[in-house]
Amino acid sequence: MMENRAAFVNSESNLTVRVNMEEIAQFVDSDAGLLWLDVSVHDETTSDLLTKTFDLHTQAVHDSLQTEIQTARYQQYGDHEFVLAHGINYASESELVEIAELGIFIGRNFVVTTHAVDLLSIDQVFDEFSTGAVVASDPESLTFLILDRFMSHIRPTVDHMSDVIDDLEEAAINNPQPLVLAGLLRLKRSALRINRAMARQTEVLHSIGSAKKNSDFELGVSFQDLATRATRTFEINNVLRERADSAMTIYQGTLALKQNETMKVLAIITAIFLPLSLLAGIYGMNFVNIPELKLEWGYFAVLGVMLAFAISVIWWVWLRQRISVWKLGSKGLFSLKVPIDHVRKRKR
């Protein structure tokens, strides 16, 4: 069950304690350490806590507690800052990739995170923070740890999508079934969702890095490095989207080719049996004066003609295929092996 939670680290003793929600007010203005409030319950009580006790901007609090996905952004409100970032919702059971939203308020001596779904990355960092496994001396450093872990959890999804598109491309060539097309459409839609989430987010991270460089140059560089990694993930995702489009084209082409092969077989069968049906129709007419009716070997002669014609059609189809291959070149067609003569000429 999701619940709001808080932890406070004392800057002098480096001891971390879990904070009860009823006692959190006394830690908000404390200069003795750093407070982290993690909000996952979005109700009126939580809204009052953020706006009145933490004195956060009302509109920013309203936006952070919304369940709809909004545009990533970074805003400064005098004594505190607000970051809205996007990641992967691993709690979703949908076959599509779902986007999760994370709001971060950065105050003088506190950090407040808000999210509507369970976030594995936040759970990990909060547990490490509350047990003293990770140490953050100020809100900016803690914010970087949170965003770094939050952003790093996007890459496993993108890597998994890369493995899936490999299988889908192979299936699109060898076995173009409707399930393959459905998989390609799901992957394309998921890539589009990640694309919309990441497009603005890289700019947000660069903005944070530029703002932090004035007060802490190394921290500003760290945020910009995080933006660079986000850009790399964004580019890989764009490649996946392009590969999905290409795979869909391959799927349609392979399906059309298989249909053409089916029609070709039917055409060959028609070409074989249509003349035979013509002969059978001629000699099946009920006329008395058909000369061949009185020939002792007439039946076998007609069967022989029909068999010879069928063999001729089959041989003609096979020969045309062989001629097409001969026109393309030798048995090394499409080989990637470079002829030795070309290598020798290159050395000279």
Image (cartoon, rainbow, N blue to C red):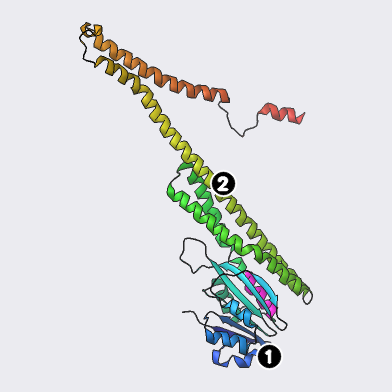
User: Badge 1, how many Cα within 10 Å: few under 14, some, many 20+?
Assistant: some
Instruction: Examine the rendered structure and indicate whether residue 49 appears above or below residue 327.
Output: below
- For the magenta stretch, what is the residue range? 139-148
Q: Quadrant of residue 99?
A: bottom right
User: From this viewpoint, is residue 218 visible?
Assistant: no
Residue 172, image x and y in percent? 49, 45
Residue type marked 1: Ala
**Which residue is tagged 2?**
246
Q: Secondary structure at mark 1?
A: loop
| Left or right of residue 307, residue 176 in this image | right
Q: Nearer the viewer, residue 45 or 210?
A: 45
Residue 330, image x and y in percent? 57, 24
Q: Residue at x 58, y 61 (%)?
A: 194
User: Badge 2, how many Cα within 10 Å: few under 14, some, many 20+?
Assistant: some
Mark 1 or mark 2, whichever is nearer to me:
2
Residue 201, magenta (yes or no): no
Q: Residue at x 50, y 43 (%)?
A: 252
Q: Quadrant of residue 161?
A: bottom right
**Which residue is tagged 1?**
32
Gap between marks 1 and 2 measured at Cα? 58 Å
Instruction: Examine the rendered structure and indicate whether residue 28 appears above or below residue 314.
Output: below
